[in-house]
Image (cartoon, grey):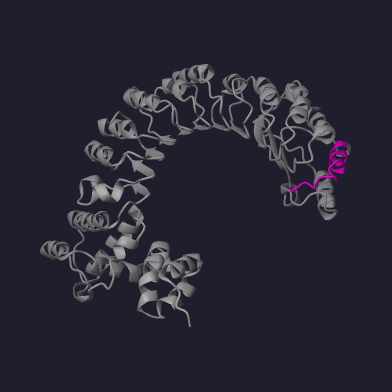
Amino acid sequence: MTKLSIDCLNLIFNELQDRNSLHSCLLVNREWCRLVVPILWKEYSWQKYLQKKIFYTILSCLQSSSKQLLSDNDIELSSTIHLKSPLFNYISFCKFPGAKIIDNIVEMVFEEEFNKGKVNKKNKRNLLEQELYKLFVSQCKNIKELNWKTLQPLSLFSGASTCFSQLYSLNIDIDFVNSNALYEMSQICKNLNKLIIDNCSQDLPGLISLIEAQRNLKSILIYPNVKKGVTCKELSKALAKKGATINDLHLGPIGAIPPSFLTSFIKLKNITINDGGNIRDEIKDFQHHLAISEFPDLQTITFAGLSCFKELAMLIEKTKGNISEICTYNSNRATENTGMLIKAIANKCPKIKYLHIYIEPKDSIHIKSLLLNCRQLKVLNFYGFDFINENNDNEDVGDELLDILAKFSAISLRKIALSGSWKYSIDIFERFFESCRNRTLSYFAIFPNDVRNYITDDHKAIVRKYIKEGVIISSNLNHL
């Protein structure tokens, strides 16, 4: 029988999708075992049902000096851990563990100490955590992702330059990581593609250095803690310097970082902004910088909690027509300029596929041009503002909207959701579904209204009828 080469075996083993098959290969002979062990540890080392066995093996991989240090500080490990000599350098095969994994190992060790009647002290836990992180930093090579949520100065440990030099994605929680450790990371890691920053509330020189050190940063996600009177001015300047490379921006809430950096993000393709919706001077400043920014290559927009419809319309008018998704979520009842935004989308977004947007009663006149110009729409959600209108402006908007959708929707439009703030007559409701017979709706919904409920049992019966006939596949009205 011809013996397969190691390269062929590696290709086969890497294509196997389940742990049981790999484990069977592990038992064939030493050569197969040597090839399969790294794959098993890389893909399945943090599976919950295996954790206790894995954790004991990890503890057995601690260097003798670490085991002695723990023992000198009254941290007892199982006797089998001291006696057991690992057959492989298992740690080098692992994905770098998140903070939760390390916490679980520490909890397991101190649970055993607790059962023996020993006191669990904070400094002992910190020491064990330190030695575990040192083990992984020294043995894991060229890791691609790191979620840095520990007080341990990972970038200062031996082997950090080899471990972190090829990082592609880094998530930093500023509540845990100090400026000095971030500065040291900036000396090691210079090729980040994605950077996530949690809980920043003031300028940190180390964080500034880390951002400035990156050669090709593409994606930045910042979730700051907003503190009154404190802003991250230097962070804003550092971000502005990376405007020529950054394609993706996630920010929220606004207020902690001066928004002047926005005007430098000339290559931006995706923008997501989340905020609480409070009226503040910071929001007005953000709106101003958004209005004067130009993102010609923009493809997706997601805004939550901000009344920026006018500024978004101005922004969209300056794009090249490649936007495929726009999502707006806003509970502010005083919102204006929704019609201006709809007109901008109709004029500049011929490729849009997913649209979630608020409309006012007077905006129905713009919906026809939206549907006629945006023929690639797949998902359309029209939200309304939940309030009682004394002038009865909402009286006919539901019927007008359904009539326009029935006449001008593209074949591609298969998911539709409408506001429960509007009334829908039974005749128009049924006529709309009749128009959908040539394009089965995969989903139809009416968002519940917190103030008034205009959906009756007759509406629900019509929906169930068309589901039965295959015109609609699913609807929330079928379950109300």
Q: Residue furthest bottom?
A: 1
Q: Nearer the viewer, residue 30 or 325?
A: 30
Q: Is residue 73 left or right of residue 473?
A: left
The residue range painted magenta reads: 428-442
Q: Residue furthest front?
A: 2
Specify whether residue 52 is painted magenta.
no
Q: Nearer the viewer, residue 421 or 242?
A: 242
Picture coordinates of residue 37 (x, y %)?
37, 70
Picture coordinates of residue 362 (x, y %)?
74, 21
Specify whether residue 436 is painted magenta.
yes
Q: Residue at x 52, y 28 (%)?
A: 277
Can residue 177 be seen here? The reply is yes
- Work out whether 196 lies above or below 228: below
Q: Is residue 329 left or right of residue 46?
A: right
- Work out whether 374 lies above or below 467: above
Picture coordinates of residue 478 (x, y %)?
75, 51
